[in-house]
Every structure is written in structure tokens, then in C-alpha cells.
Image (tube, rainbow, N blue to C red):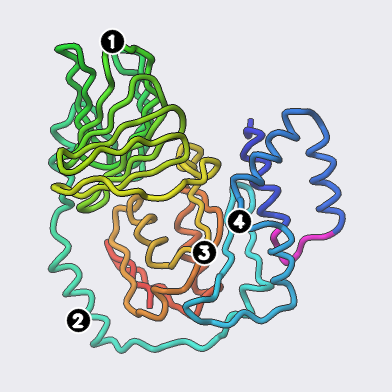
Amino acid sequence: MVALSDQAIDWLVRLQSDEVTDLDRQAFVDWSGQSDDHMRAARDAQALFGAVSQTETAQDWTGQEAALSPNATIPINTARNTRRRMPGSMARFGTRRFALSIASLCALVLAIMAGAGVPTDIWARWTAQYSTDIGLFKTVNLPDGTVAHMNTASAFSIDFSNGVRRVDLAAGEVIFDVAKDAQHPFIVSAQGGEAMAVGTVYGVRITDDHVNVTVREGVVEVSTGVGSSMRLLAGDQAVYHDGRGPQTGGHVDLAAYGSWQRGKLIFNNRPLGDVIDEVQRYKTERIVIARDAVHDLKVTGVFEIAELDDLLDTLEQAMNARVVRLPLLTVIY
């Protein structure tokens, strides 16, 4: 049975379609009014979207021509059971295509494949106590009662001794629902820094040469041994690099944070380059953007992780771009 939260998101995605009707809108009102749980799911879904894609904003796109520029926001939406294409506003983004010569494409492919190498975190995932493969998720119950929600390509080991519960995050992202134990602090170590809590919910993510710490509930103290530590409350985020003190990462939309736990990725006016970087985490093949003008286009939408190929297929319809699929490589230009 599909969860109410997913049904609510599917409703909001449907309401953003150019083909939405008054009957659809009334049907959503009727669905929301079925019970308090339905109403709560509808409110949570609207909060999850936040500024991502309010239905009024989506309707504003109908009948308008969107300028194809780095500042243009392109709403693209996919959701479970919403597989049909929405040609309205997508079709209005120019039809001009840029040709990439066979020689140039071959040179690009060879350069990419020569530098692809082996993923840097593969050894960490092989040797850690707990790990997930690319595109997979896992929930782990730790010995102290803490629940660890592991995202794609993640790895960590634990050492619960000497009065401290210590986790060594080697790769990826994990959200920890920490069991309360005031006598034994819970510490996540990653790339030279630590995030300490007693009983809370927070996530730690390694991305290239920096680490993000995001607090969903409670209080977390972040330190690197360089400069002062930083105390985070619910909704706060800190970022640090190895050998540098933590810096504020701003306030996080908690309704959208950790959406991957529900099998979704949510983007609000994000450059396509950032979107592809995020999608890359869930795909084994290499995805490369070969043209800067495409790299900077803004994307807004809710996407099913299990159907990310649909996102790539939609690019040609929604953007002035082409997608070329090769063995182990996808090129967007």
C-alpha cells in the first residue's frame, strides 16, 4: 500500500502538470479531507515542497514562455505512478539543438574514461563494518539502540568502548537516530572532525574534501581541533574541511532534508550541475555535462530515486540539451 506521504506528493506533482483540471484540484481537496492523517500528509507534502513548486507557481508557467538562460528555473517533475510526460511548458523551452561533432565527442569520451579510475571510496566500503553499494540504502540497529539510516555508497565502523560511542564515517551519508545515554556521548568522526551528541537525530555526509553536519532534532557540537567548536540546533547545518574549523552552512529545510529516506530527491532552483552531482551518487555509470550553458540551468522538482533514468530522459524535452548514452557513460550537452 502506498504511504499517505507519497500519495500527497504525487498529488502535488499532478497539480503542477499543464494538464491539471478543476476536477483534479477538487479531487485533491476531497482526498485531503478524508481524515486527519490525509490532511496532515497534505500539509507535510506542501511543506516538503516549500518554495520548490507551489501549485500556484506551477500554474503560472502555463501559457508563459520561459527564457532559456542561466537564471531560468525549469520545473521538471517525476513521481511514482506519474509516468506520463507533461509536454506543455516543457515543449515551450526552445527546440534548437547544438551539434557536437563525432570527433569532439570521441575525444571527450576518451578523456573522461582515462580519468575515471576507481571510485575513491570503494576501499572504505569494502573494509568498513557497515556499508551500502551505489544506489542502495540500509537501516542498521547499533548495539546501543541507535538507528543508523545509510544513504547510497556509504560506510562506517563503530567503537563503543571507554565510555564513548564512536562512529568512524568513511564514506557517504548516514542519519543517526541516537539512543539517549547521557553517560556515553555519541561521536561521529569524519575527515579530521567530530560531531558529538547525547540523544538526538542528525546526519553526517562526506562530499569530496568537506563534511556536512545537519541536525534534525536536539543539539550537536561540531569540532575539528582547529579554532572554536560550533553548537548546532534543529535545522542548523555546519560544514568543515580537514584541518579547518567548522563554518555555518545555514538553516536547512527539515521538511525536505533526508528525503532520500523516502526514495525521493528534491531540488529547489538548483543548477543542473548540482543536480547531476547528486544524481551521480546513485548511478554506477559516469554522468558528464559537456557544455557550461547547460551546467548552469536551474532545476526545480521532486524525483523518484528509483526512476532517475526518467530524469535524464526528460532533459531533452525540458531543456536545450541532448543526452547521449554510452556504455558506462552518459554525456549531457
Question: Which is nearer the eye, 146 or 139?
Answer: 146
Mark 4 and 3 residues: CB-CB less than 8 Å, in contact?
Answer: yes
Give the residue pinned by disc 2: 107
- Crowdedness of circle 2 by 10 Å Cα count: few (<14), some, many (20+)? few
Q: Which circle, 2 or 1, is nearer the viewer?
A: 1
In which quadrant of the rendered image does the N terminus lie?
Answer: top right
Neighbourhood count class around disc 1 (C-alpha, 10 Å): few under 14, some 14–19, many 20 upward:
few
Horizontal side, residue 256 vs residue 41: left or right? left
Q: Secondary structure at mark 1?
A: loop
User: Magenta segment, which residues?
Assistant: 16-21
Mark 2 vs mark 1, CA separation in Å: 59 Å
Mark 1 near mark 3, Cβ–Cβ under 8 Å? no
Cα distance between the residues tagged 2 and 4: 41 Å
Local SS, label 4:
loop
Disc 4 versus disc 1: nearer the observer: 1
Point out the tag, 3 or 2, that comes first from the N-terminus: 2
Mark nearer the N terminus (2 vs 1): 2
Under mark 1, the amino acid is Gln
Circle 2 — which element? helix
Amino acid type for the residue under numbered disc 3: Asn
Disc 4 or 1, which lies upstream in sequence?
4
What kind of residue is marked 2?
Ala
Residue at 35% x, 80% y: name it: 291
Q: Which residue is mark 3?
A: 269
